[in-house]
Image: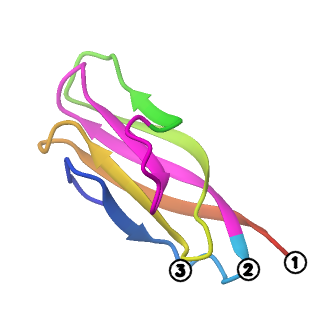
Amino acid sequence: AGSATAYTAVSVANFVPPTGCVFCGFAGFDSQTSQDYFQIRPTGSTVVIPFLTFYIGLTAPVAVSAFLQTCCGTNRQIDYRVNNNNSKLDLYVGSYEDEL
């Protein structure tokens, strides 16, 4: 994904078919301070503080991983942001739910 501090869309369309609505995966987060966090929400959402907010709370810098499951909608995109542009977030799709 990257190190954007404003919500930025990331496509999962290469890994989730058009009938996919939810994906499960992993996040790799390179945290630079113990107060760093990242947030995930479906693209188009207007929620300011989404359900998926991951605070690290560890002495940094440290790299951590987290399991996540979230809606990606019919456009097969999610938004992410980090609170510190020195931190970096990587997203990996592991599986998806289908609407068939």
- 8 to the left or right of 84: right
Q: Which residue is mark 1?
A: 100
Residue extending farthest to the right is: 100
Q: Which residue is mark 3?
A: 13
Question: Where is residue 63 shown, x and y percent of the image?
Answer: 32, 36
* Label 3 Cα crowd, 10 Å radius (few <14 / some 14-19 / many 20+): some
Q: Nearer the viewer, residue 96 or 78?
A: 78
Structural distance between the alpha carbons of marks 2 and 3: 10 Å
Q: Amino acid at mark 2?
A: Thr
Q: Earlier in the sequence, mark 1 or mark 3?
A: 3
* Label 1 Cα crowd, 10 Å radius (few <14 / some 14-19 / many 20+): few
Residue extending farthest to the front is: 46
Q: Nearer the viewer, residue 92 or 42?
A: 42
What residue is at 43 percent from the left and 57 percent from the top?
91
- 3 to the left or right of 63: left
Q: Mark 2 touching mark 1, by CB under 8 A?
A: yes
Q: Amino acid at mark 1?
A: Leu
What residue is at 58 percent from the left and 64 percent from the top?
72
Question: Where is residue 20 shown, x and y percent of the image?
Answer: 70, 73
Region of the chain picked out in magenta, as a range: 21-49
Q: Earlier in the sequence, mark 2 or mark 3?
A: 3
Question: Where is residue 39 shown, x and y percent of the image?
Answer: 39, 41
Q: Which residue is mark 2?
A: 19
Mark 2 or 3, closer to the camera: 2
Q: Amino acid at mark 3?
A: Ala
* Label 2 Cα crowd, 10 Å radius (few <14 / some 14-19 / many 20+): some
Quadrant where the N terminus lies? bottom left
